[in-house]
Image (cartoon, rainbow, N blue to C red):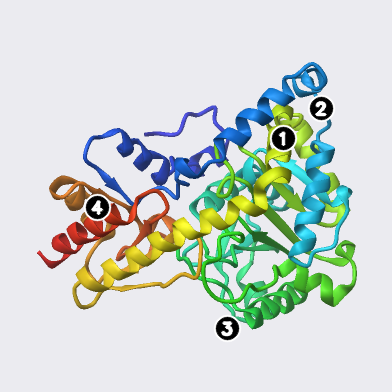
């Protein structure tokens, strides 16, 4: 489709999300979908939310719940998040916290805040598709975030603009499921200090650890080095979408106050504030049952991850490799060279009714044609085993 002559040049870089399009397949009968990273709705604390919304609409709170509010976010929720971040080793106060309409909105604001056309964003190869979509609108160039590459090499490659930030999800990343080691996090802090650029830490999956020892967030490691969050360049983006509810669109940012202040201005220009009633409900549910709810979520997803890994071991032919995530929602599969993930998807949908996301969508340069992403979060173990069996059948054929 040709570009409309009245559209800004940035519009040519904006594309439909392959994952959003694939989600439409969920309405088709008989499809086993490993496509979207969708939480299981059976795990939503629906009764707790029902009570929370009833309370928010009661006579004592309804005026506040239904009224305009401050852009920074609902104060009791921000106070809860200060305590929540402290559990991960991050010391901050309410002025370091901004509530956003999902962490996706935070990524859009950060792209708008940091990127001028031609500036460089360092990202994983592959990286989260939603981050690429958010940043793309601001016309950057992408460079591969590679620990073996020095600051001077990154600077030299950024001919038309500066290196503005590095972006990554260090815990159980979307799409690979991989986790950055503590030495890797320390090395990344060294690199961003040398480049004098920001570091965006996407913590969407941090609460979903099933195995291994927790690793402190990058922001906590930097704060331990520098003493105060106000001296830190790391910007932490969190979300309730994978733990409580994606439909309420509730995320948060924790960063030094000058960054939060600039993001507040962006929020005022975009949507004024996130829905107050949703913030009130999320606060009440988080305060009442977050610590007891999350272990149930972990237990369910751990069993589903194990089922997928077992099924892959049993049914995948030689030459197929996959990650073994310690948490999160995804397994990343590398197919033999010459097999296209997109072609495999078309064949799998046509013959065995199995859906997944071709990996090429997660690479800024369009590489990774022989990769796919599988999500295990929204299917029970029996369905996962059957879906992987069918997929192995197509690959063997």
Q: Position of residue 146 (x, y in %)?
A: 56, 76
Relative to residue 294, is residue 309 depicted above or below? Answer: below
Relative to residue 379, is residue 200 depicted above or below? Answer: below
Crowd band around label 3 with a 10 angstrom C-alpha radius: few (<14), some (14–19), many (20+): few
385 displayed left or right of 117: left
Q: Earlier in the sequence, mark 1 or mark 3?
A: 3
Q: Which residue is mark 1?
A: 279
Q: Which residue is mark 4?
A: 345
SS for callout 4: helix
Relative to residue 344, is residue 102 depicted above or below? Answer: above
Q: Earlier in the sequence, mark 4 or mark 3?
A: 3
Pointers 1 and 2 in contact (CB under 8 A)?
A: yes
- Front tag of 1 and 4: 1
Q: Residue at x 81, y 55 (%)?
A: 83
Q: Residue at x 38, y 67 (%)?
A: 306
What is the quadrant of the N terminus in the image? Answer: top left
Q: Which residue is mark 3?
A: 148
SS for callout 1: helix
Q: Earlier in the sequence, mark 1 or mark 2?
A: 2
> In the picture, residue 397 is in which quadrant?
bottom left
Inspect this view and state whether residue 161 appears.
no
The residues tagged by marks 1 and 4 sit, at their Cα atoms, a distance apart of 39 Å
Crowd band around label 2 with a 10 angstrom C-alpha radius: few (<14), some (14–19), many (20+): some
- Front tag of 1 and 2: 1
Q: Which residue is mark 2?
A: 69
Q: Earlier in the sequence, mark 3 or mark 2?
A: 2
The residues tagged by marks 4 and 3 sit, at their Cα atoms, a distance apart of 34 Å
Which residue reaches farthest left?
Answer: 397
């Amino acid at each position: 489709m040709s570009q409309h002559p009245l559209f800004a040049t940035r519009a040519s870089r904006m594309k439909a999300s392959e994952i959003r399009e694939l989600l439409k397949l969920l309405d088709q009968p008989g499809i086993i979908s490993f496509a979207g990273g969708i939480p299981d709705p059976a795990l939503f604390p629906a009764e707790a939310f029902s009570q929370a919304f009833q309370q928010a609409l009661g006579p004592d709170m309804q005026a506040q719940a239904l009224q305009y509010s401050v852009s920074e976010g609902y104060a009791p929720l921000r106070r809860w998040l200060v305590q929540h971040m402290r559990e991960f080793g991050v010391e901050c106060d309410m002025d370091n916290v901004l509530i956003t309409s999902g962490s996706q909105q935070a990524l859009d604001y950060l792209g708008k805040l940091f990127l001028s056309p031609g500036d460089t964003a360092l990202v994983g190869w592959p990286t989260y598709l939603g981050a690429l979509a958010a940043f793309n609108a601001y016309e950057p160039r992408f460079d591969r975030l590679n620990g073996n590459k020095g600051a001077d090499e990154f600077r030299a490659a950024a001919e038309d603009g500066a290196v503005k930030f590095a972006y990554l999800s260090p815990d159980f990343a979307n799409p690979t499921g991989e986790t950055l080691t503590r030495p890797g996090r320390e090395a990344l802090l060294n690199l961003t200090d040398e480049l004098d650029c920001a570091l965006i830490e996407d913590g969407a999956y941090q609460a979903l650890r099933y195995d291994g020892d927790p690793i402190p967030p990058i922001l906590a490691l930097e704060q331990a080095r520098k003493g105060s969050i106000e001296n830190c360049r790391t910007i932490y983006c969190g979300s309730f979408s994978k733990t409580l509810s994606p439909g309420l669109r509730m995320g948060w940012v924790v960063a030094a106050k000058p960054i939060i202040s600039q993001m507040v201005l962006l929020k005022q220009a975009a949507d004024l504030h996130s829905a107050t009633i949703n913030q009130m409900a999320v606060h009440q549910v988080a305060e009442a049952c977050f610590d007891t709810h999350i272990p149930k979520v972990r237990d369910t997803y751990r069993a589903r991850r194990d089922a997928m890994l077992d099924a892959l071991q049993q049914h995948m032919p030689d030459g197929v490799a996959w990650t073994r995530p310690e948490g999160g929602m995804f397994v990343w599969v590398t197919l033999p060279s010459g097999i296209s993930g997109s072609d495999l998807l078309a064949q799998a949908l046509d013959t065995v009714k199995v859906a997944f996301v071709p990996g090429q969508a997660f690479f800024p340069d369009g590489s990774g044609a022989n990769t796919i992403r599988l999500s295990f979060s929204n299917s029970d173990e029996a369905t996962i085993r059957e879906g992987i069996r069918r997929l192995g059948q197509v690959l063997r054929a």
